[in-house]
Image: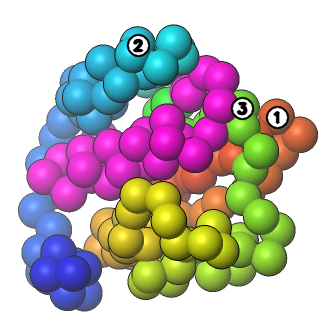
Amino acid sequence: MLDLEELGGTDHITRAPVPLPELAGTAVAPHLRTAERTGRALTCDAADTTVDVDARWLVPAIGNLLANALRHGHGTVRLTAAVHEGRLRLSVTDEGPGFPPEFLPRAFDRFARAEASRTSEGSGLGLAFVRAVAAAHGGTARAENSEGGATVTLDLPC
C-alpha cells in the first residue's frame, strides 16, 4: 500500500539508462526456480537496446506479472520487451484460462481479485501496483485475453 501511495506522482521516478536485457533478466531470475519446480517454462525475449526507466520500480512490477502468470496461468510464461518509436512495451503472456471477462474492466483496481472465493494467495494489490508503476513512468498498463491465455502489457515512454 505504501508503494502505491509513493507512486502517486512522478516525483518518485528516477530514470536512468538500463540495458533492456539486464532489466528483463533481473526481473525474471527470482521466478526461474518457481517455474522449474512446477515443470513450466519461463522465457524472456528482450531487445538488445538501452531504455531510460526507473529499474527500482519496474523490476518488481514485471516480477509481479511473472508471479501472477505462474500462479494463475498454465504452460509457458513469456516476457517480451521491445522498443518501438521511443516506447518500451513489456508483455507477460501465459497459456492459461485467461482473466474472467467480467474481471478485465477492474483488473487494475486496488483489492480486485478474479476469484470469487478469495481463498487463494494474493491481496489484490499486485496489478494496482503494476498500473501505478506504469502511470508514474507516464505510461499505461492493460490486461487482455487471447485464445491461448492472458497477456498483461506495459507501454512506457523510454
Percent from the top left, x then y, of residue 104?
71, 71
Label 3 vs label 2: CA separation?
A: 16 Å
Label 1 vs label 2: CA separation?
A: 21 Å
Label 3 vs label 1: CA separation?
A: 5 Å
Decide if residue 134 is in sight here: no
Residue 104 vs 60, above or below: the answer is below
**Residue drawn 40% across and 13% down?**
36
Q: Is residue 6 left or right of residue 82?
A: left
Check disc 2: other Cα within 10 Å, few if <14, some if 14-19, many if 20+.
few
Quadrant of the rendered image containing residue 18: top left
The residue stretch that appears in magenta: 50-78
**Label 3 is placed on what type of residue?**
Glu
**Label 1 is placed on what type of residue?**
Gly
**Residue drawn 65% across and 47% down?**
151
Q: Which residue is mark 2?
A: 36
SS at circle 2: helix
Percent from the top left, x then y, of residue 148?
82, 34
**Label 2 is placed on what type of residue?**
Glu
Q: Which residue is mark 3?
A: 95
Q: Earlier in the sequence, mark 3 or mark 2?
A: 2
Q: Is residue 15 left or right of residue 75?
A: left
**Residue drawn 71% across and 79% down?**
105
Decide if residue 31 is in sight here: yes
Q: Which residue is mark 1?
A: 148
In this orientation, which residue lies closer to the viewer: 158 or 147?
147
Labels 3 & 1 near each other (Cβ < 8 A)? yes
**Residue drawn 43% across and 40% down?**
66
